[in-house]
Amino acid sequence: MTTLFIDDKEITVEPGTSILEACRRHGIEVPYFCYHPELSVAANCRMCLVEVEGWNKPAASCCTPVSEGMKVRTRTEALKKDREMIMEYLLIHHPLDCPVCDQGGDCKLQDYAVEYGPSKGRYSEPKRAVINYDLGPFVNTCMTRCIHCTRCVRFANEIAGTGDIGVLNRGDHMTIAGIVEEALESELSGNLPDICPVGALLDKPSHDLARPWELSHHSSTCIQCPNGCDIQIESRGEQVMRIRPVEGSPEPFICDRGRYVYDSFRSPARILEPQIRQGDGFGSATWEEAFARTVELLKDKRVGILFSPYWSLEGLMSIRLMRDAVFPDAKVAFDLHRRDMRPFAFEEGFSMTTEQIESADQVVVLGCDLRQRLPLLMLRLRKRSRQGRPVTRIGAMNYRTNMSLSNDALIRPRDWHAVIARAMEQVQQLGKTAAGMDEWMASVDGRHEAGKLLADALMADTCALIVGEEIRSHEDAASLIYGLDLLMRACGHAEEGRDGRNLVPEAMNAQMLSAVFGDVRASAGELFALAQAGELDALVLVGSDPVGDGLFPSAAKAALERVPLVQVGAIEGEISRYAEVKLPAAAYVEIEGTFLNMEGRVRTANKPVKSLGEERPLWKVMMRLAMEMGSEPPVVSLEELREALYAAMPEVRDACNSVECDACLIRVGRNRDARALPRKTAEAFPLDVVSRYSMYREGMWARASELLSEAGRIHALDDVLVHPDTLAELGLKPGPLVVESFLGRHTFDIGVRDDVSPGVIYIAKRGVAGDLSDVTSARLVGCGGDS
Amino acid sequence: MIPSDPKQVTQICFDRIRIPDQRRLEVARANGAYSFLPTVLNEFNSEQIIEEVKKSGLRGRGGAGFPTGLKWSFVPRNTGKPTYLLCNADEGEPGTFKDRDIMRYDPHLLIEGMIMAGYALGVRDAYIYIRGEFVAEARVLNEAIAEAYAANLLGENILGSGYSMHLTVHRGAGAYICGEETALIESLEGKPGRPRFKPPFPAVEGFYRCPTVVNNVETLSTIPAILKHGGDWHAAIGAPNSAGCKIFSVSGHVNRPGNYEVPMGTPLKTLIEDYCGGLKRGTVPKAIIPGGSSAPWLTSEHYELPLTFDDLVKAGSMLGSGAIIVMDETADVIKIARRLSHFYAHESCGQCTPCREGTGWLERLMIRLEAGKARASDIEVLRDAAEHMAGRTICALADGAAAPVLSMLKHFPEEVRARVVEKAA
Amino acid sequence: MTMNEAPRFSEERLQEIQALVARYPGPQSALLPVLHMAQEDFGYLSLDVQKYVAEVLGLTLIQVREVVTFYTMFREQPCGKYLMEVCTNASCMLNGADELVRHMCDKLGIKVGETTPDGMFTVTEVECAGACSGAPVVQINNVYHENVDAAYIDAFIEKASKEDAA
Ligand SMILES: Cc1cc2nc3c(=O)[nH]c(=O)nc-3n(C[C@H](O)[C@H](O)[C@H](O)COP(=O)(O)O)c2cc1C
Ligand code: SF4
Ligand code: FES
């Protein structure tokens, strides 16, 4: 540790810390523009000057490391003049348009001009002219305000990894420029306006809509992906104007999906009042009428319940309580991406924190489009790759990551067994094994060389295994995960403190779902099959859009042709056209509640945004449903509900009551006796089908958001993609081709990309190819009509 | 041949410069080039060489005057990373044109110096970063390097010594700032030449974040003589704390402008009168820029000053690159300061606020002043804007930019006052 | 190269570039030399040329744009057959560079930075050329001409015009 004196205060920091960081950590205010704790140091604004005893000139504190016994002064007359001059230099070309600037009131330049600036600028020469850039749907530019701090450039290079912003020219002709076709490539582009300390890069969607001082702030949790970022919602009245990350939370950035989804809160797709089907359409109804119809549909019926995992823990608990009270035999499903319902050796959720993953010796990503699924975790992997740490990836597609991978293998989903078996073989050769491994290997015929990459990584001291949707959705997922579990145990990555098993969950709250619903869960596919077979009379849907999302759209449609649907939710999906009744439940920004992210961190949302209509918190809707169905409501207050939740998951109470709430992690479920051996399956068709997740198009909220839909359009790939060799082998050319599967023959436009594994058909779940999501294998045939 | 008695030495780098065809290996060798190289490669070790260079008192000839041996000793050994040697042949400092002569007339001297330096530092790959405009000089260097490769003076296992070094000439493309060593490194990495802040210093983290030594052409060209004759020999030449000879590039209002290598400590007046044939007009200069355009100006009161690092600092200026621009009484100092302000505004890399904005501001103020359109109050602004650039930026360009303006204000207040108007047009 | 043709280096050039890249720890180091080659081969660095260079070296377009716009020797616009760059920095100025520029412009009927309508001559001012003992210095197509005066320039212009007419 290094001890120094800042303004006579004795301070101890880690060696190598900059003076500026030392000041920041000890509440000593030093002004700065270009420094940003998440970005590399540029030291170009020169605002952070301080004096160091014995030095003949002022030092830029952001790039000057502390040294033992150093004596630093941050407030002297000379520095006051220096800061005044820096402000004067900065302002000579800056327009004086604070009153019309979106950043006004939230601008470092404005703040510092007041605090440190000269009373009057003395520059009387011509100002320079600059041009603005079109950076796509999320970012506006007003480059006359740019102060050339290069934060945005460093963000694009270091955080987004896209490198599509740069510095052109030199001297005072220097300009920041974007090189973009239609929009910034990054899924994190919405952070740029936050990164920009002045009003040069602005949030386009909220441009000119509100001044910072008109907004009220609400803290909440984003449920748009399992990372569950803390968010700050800015609203004017009941209208959400903006969503931003929360300073000081585990991740200082949020992704565009989480940020721009807010226009869906007021979209026509919101369910804001009870509705009852009338012919082809819906009519508004009172709660009484709607419940009367609901009771008619559900009373004494065999009911299946499907819900989405994005409700709060309280909401989810209320679903369980309602089910137990009213439909004690009902099957419950909540995964739309799981085909294999046997227990997994390690359940969905992360054993490691994202910080631990960032610093692990090795990271292996298996079958996951992390950039789309978990953009913030991807950001961490980019950070580690910048530090020269390896990342290995194996999967059906070279999903674009904006970083260089140290190892990369393309495989077909049907090869997973062979990959894992090959890895087992290798670790055994190196003397590492686990009971059950021999048996597992013996039931797999082939070996795939990609397994070697996996085994190599497992030899490290710490190894983070990130298992993605290609495995989770696999028909034989339980055996694959068991196989991976054996490997991890053999190599010491399952021990307490070194547990590297991370299964990317479908959504938030995964740990709670397996703990609370483990005994009654079924697959969504199974529910639909039962309904189709006449073994169910009605479906209750709480959130979720199995027609729009997931792997079972055609099964869902077929089921709903047969049985009526009661929809409880905050927003409609494509499924809503099948509903008989719609009961409005409050959206995630409109409630107080608790959430769990994939790491098991407890996030709490409080100070909700006002409701827009008649929607009620889900738990109230569930309890009212129980009452209407003739049961005693299991709980009558949020406190009682929380008690029920804590009874089922005592660790949540502990975490909620702890001051260090962020540090308490809810553990992922383990099934120590889930011994699933590989099944010998013969694929019906020669090509494997993998469906692509798009952060701009998946989920009802995203689809109801015009902003995200626009970005989805810009970033869309072809609907169906294959490797050029796959077509060449069949003697086919890109263009309209017939895909034959158990669903029949359908014609799709087929594109080629060499980052798709040969032997794989890669489909966009949204768009025309959506129905293929049900399919795991298919055949490509030359052109021809649909059958 | 350089005499072995230090008292007789008057030239080191220019010793063979006037020999016709000296650029050809054959001729150079006949005149002693590379004659001592086998001894160095076979009998000296790294520590010995660095010790000799330390002893020699050689200070960098590129502008900053940093002791060369000390710089070399900062290079960490056994880091597992390669060490690079970069020769700074950017020669951009206005008034400087000395390295050009070494490169075009005696390229083998530089190459030999680089091989010796490379050997001392354990370098495998060395580069000469030459300013883009020096097309002919780059060609001469490339021809000389090709000859050296053919003679096994470069490449693998040089002269059977077991030491291997590769040398590449790299052309810049028009940017004064790339003479600053960290900007040079950025430029050599294929990026805009924006200086890096220090620490880390290039010796520890330079080219591709590996240990790197950057030395000026003249500095490296002095190495062969130092190793041949010994560090003590070199230390005995010149003046205390300013050992050896120095090439001064003299230009402006003198009768015989040119490069003159003289022992350090030679008085300014001797250089100008005895070597350059005196001033074009008059007997004493009105103003002298002694170390390239970034050096604060001197006036006639310093005409007798001995040319050493310390004496120039004492006089409020610096030796810099040894470029001396002489102005006689006909010079319009305001115009010169305005022109130099334009230079710095044009050449600022743009990253530091005070330099990016300040250089442009100074130039615009100077244009008005020169045109007689500045108010008296503008003079204080000018001084303030210049004073607060210097010493507050990543590199020293901003200091250089402030120097002409502050010098003008300091030495010629009357002329400035005469130029301002009470009410600006 | 005609206007619409995509820029392409010759085979020899590509081989030269490959050899060049091998001399550096990373391919980006070859960017300045390759841009010099591109300017020599294609006359100036149009956006298409910059894209092509990015592709050849495996860089992003912004990396190339940053460099092209930073260095003054790289031109994004075509210039005259004779690019006459006059140093007007201190030493040359003290020796009449300003008067020389004025003379050249008057003679050619253009302003600084412009090209004669016949596409023959461009006159620009540049910073210190590093040859101050020969002030004033004019670089014509990268060849140094020292101690230049009006008569020298007149003769040069006449000779060049005559050669072109022939
Ligand atoms: C703005 C600026 C321009 C410089 N230009 C040159 C130059 O053209 N040639 C040079 O050798 N050094 C130049 N230097 C000095 C170098 O940064 C560095 O000190 C020198 O190359 C080190 O070599 P030396 O120790 O052999 O002198 C410049 C420095 C600055 C701040
Ligand atoms: S002082 Fe000027 S030239 Fe030097 S780094 Fe800063 S902006 Fe660039
Ligand atoms: S914060 Fe230190 S220079 Fe900008």
Image (tube, helix red, strand yellow):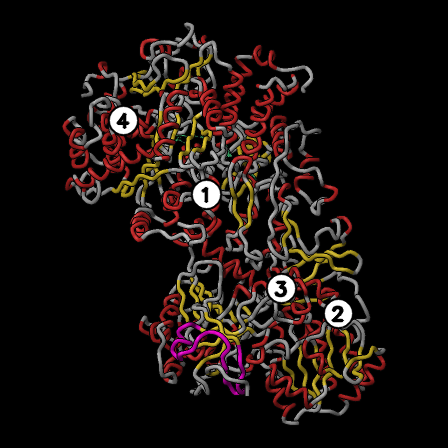
Q: Secondary structure at mark 4?
A: helix
Question: Which residue is disc 2 drawn over?
Answer: A268
**Amino acid type of disc 3?**
Gly
Q: Which residue is mark 1?
A: C68
Q: Amino acid at mark 4?
A: Thr
Residue of label 4: B222
Measuring from the top left, give residue B171's x and y in whole percent: 35, 38
Q: Nearer the viewer, residue B124 or A676?
A: B124
Provide the secondary structure element on which disc 1 rests. Answer: helix
Of all chains, the one bearing label 2 is: A
Label 3 chain ID:
A
Mark 1: few, some, or many residues within 10 Å (few <14, many ≥20)?
A: many
Disc 1 marks which amino acid? Val
Tell me the tag on residue A228.
Answer: 3
Give how far apart the Cα atoms at labels 4 and 1 are.
35 Å
Identify which amino acid the numbered label 2 is placed on: Pro
Residue B340 at x, y = what percent? 49, 24
